[in-house]
Image: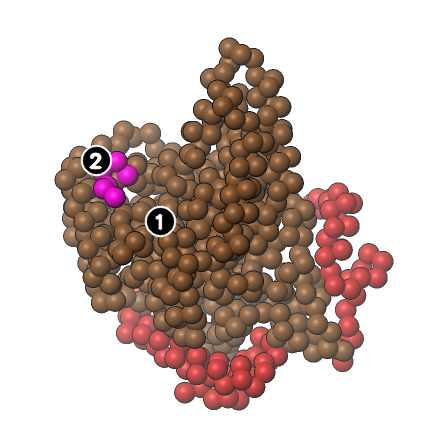
Chain colours: A red, B brown
Amino acid sequence: MITKEEVQHIAKLARIELADEELKKFQKDFSQILEFFETLKDVDVSDEKSTAYSIALNNVTRDDISRREKPEVVEKLIRMTPQIEGNYVKVPKVL
Amino acid sequence: MTIEEIRTGLLKKEFSAVELAEQYLARIREKDQELHAFLNVTEKLALAQAREIDEKIARLPARQATGEELPPLAGVPCSVKDAILVEGVLCTAGSRMLENYIAPYDATVVQKIKKAGALIVGKTNMDEFGMGSSTENSAFGPTKNPYDPTRVAGGSSGGSAASVATGECAVSLGEDTGGSIRLPASFCGVVGLKPTYGAVSRYGIIAIASSLDQVGPMAKTVEDCETLFHVIRGKDPMDSTSVESKISNDEFLISKLRIGVPKEYFGEGLDPQVEKVIRGAIEKLEHAGAKIIEVSLPHCSYALADYYIINMSEISANLARYDGIRYGASVSGGNLLATYMRSRGEKLGAEVKRRIMLGTYALSAGYYEQYYVKAQKVRALLRKDFDQVFEKVDVIAGPVSPFLPFKIGEKVGNPLAMYLVDMYTVTLNLAGLPGLSVPAGSVQGLPVGLQLIAPAFQEQTLFETGKAFEKIRTF
């Protein structure tokens, strides 16, 4: 069984604030799900290479040149941010 | 109405595109209060697009009334899953985090259906960010099953499936990460295709698990699904994982078709009533001339655990973008860390938090090899299972879901029980293969879907098999 402190630690790593009831519920859920993940222990993969993609893909590259977006698109994207100042995204103080 | 019926009706001037749009919008008003397939109805957009089609038809010279100049989806009412961007329209992905997010541009698939003349009638309900198998995880409430409002529509593209089933639209664009098109198609009695990984561009789709996500068509008939697929498929410079696939023109003969039936798809956990419908469907294909071969996918029993490790790991990385700073909802916490934590803590739903956190755990130091690396290796074994089977058969047939559409609320408290619904669908996403869900029959009035699986980029085999099956099924 995963401990409450471990759940709290993962929540912090994932940048998610949890209420107490959530913490309790997740402790139970995580223990069940992680136990289910243990089924993979039985598989012998000693001859396998790790594959990240299901189909064979080659690297797709393009020239490293900037593509200018239309000002109205830039404007729209900027407007999406919760806090702006001029054309900048405003970030709260770090410490 | 089917795409063909709409096309013929427009060309014969039996109705105008505007009349058609109004008829479908009225249907939405009549049905959707109870059904809740839509999060947002785009009435103005649909009517404006319809007027353009009507003008195009008015300009067609009389002798060209064959419709060659009319684009392939002219006047076809289409709904779009709310994870796919339509410029200027709200795009919530079923989450409070994106409650007020207005799409700044069109997804490539949306550009394509617009160019093909489709009328976009609205954005459909879904499990939050596509995480779920019943649409109950939508922050805006579940979609009901059109065959029984006390049951789920399946998920995560439940709104898309229900909207097609009820005739609120003719076709829909869904998205499938681990069964999210095929499962609701099966539960709502419609056709749904998960294309091969890379067959359709994902530019402008709200990503969750990038090695698994794929956009695909949903419709009432296999033919309509096929038409929509050909409109949206192809390489896109904006999505480097997309590829241009070759379409085989080989003549399809059911008498030459070899169908593999994996014994692992009929094992523990399958409802005997569902099994009976699927076995019956396979028998019909056999009577029609197909050769049935029993096959084995030995690593199938590991697929579900494998899938969820990879899915959650990729989710934890992909959803880091919802930080309360760049876009989406923000809950101020005074400093930066507290703003991150509060925004995510308050605006993300339980299943999304669960997956981000378990993914974070699986990728963290000390566990990475044990979970993520191991899962990617098991994934390679699963692919080999399929490669070996496809040396002997052209398609694989089996159930989409192990059981019937379940009651709303039945599984929400138990995430693991919910994950089990995906046992036959996630394998294809892991292997990158295309899969089609076709209605095969019903049990106590509830639809059951047959799943057909083909080698990568052999969607055409699925369509031909599906169309052949539609002709011989009896219900």
Q: Nearer the viewer, mark 2 or mark 1?
A: 1
Residue B439 is at least partly visible in this image: yes
Q: Quadrant of residue B258?
A: top left
Q: Amino acid at mark 2?
A: Ile
Q: Which residue is mark 1?
A: B189
B401 left or right, relative to B128:
left
| Residue B448 relative to residue B410: left or right | left
- Secondary structure under the numbered disc 1 in the rendered image: loop
Compared with B20, B344 (above or below) is below
- Up/down of B354 relative to B23, above or below: below
Q: Is residue B339 left or right of residue B203?
A: right
Query: How far separated are the C-alphas under marks 2 and 1?
Result: 24 Å
Residue B6, x across and y down, in percent: 47, 30
- What residue would you read off at disc 2? B254
Magenta segment boundaries in residue numbering: B470-475
**Residue at x 14% of width, y 40% of height:** B287
Q: Give the residue type that dot 1 points to.
A: Gly
The disc numbered 1 marks a residue on which chain?
A: B
Determine the residue positioned at 39% across, 79% down: A32
Are callouts 2 and 1 both on one chain?
A: yes
Specify the quadrant of the image occupied by residue A91. Answer: bottom right
The quarter of the image holding the C terminus of chain B is top left
Q: B392 or B232: nearer the eye?
A: B232
- Please give left or right for residue B390 compared with residue B27 in the image: left
The image shows residue B336 at horizontal and vertical percentages of: 73, 75
- Observer-nearest of A70 and B22: B22
Task: Write down the quadrant of residue B2 in the picture.
Answer: top left
Residue lying at the far top in this picture: please name it.
B63
- Percent position of residue B192, x then y: 39, 47
**Where is residue A30 drawn, in percent x and y?**
44, 79
| Circle 2 SS class | helix
Q: Can residue B202 be seen here?
A: no
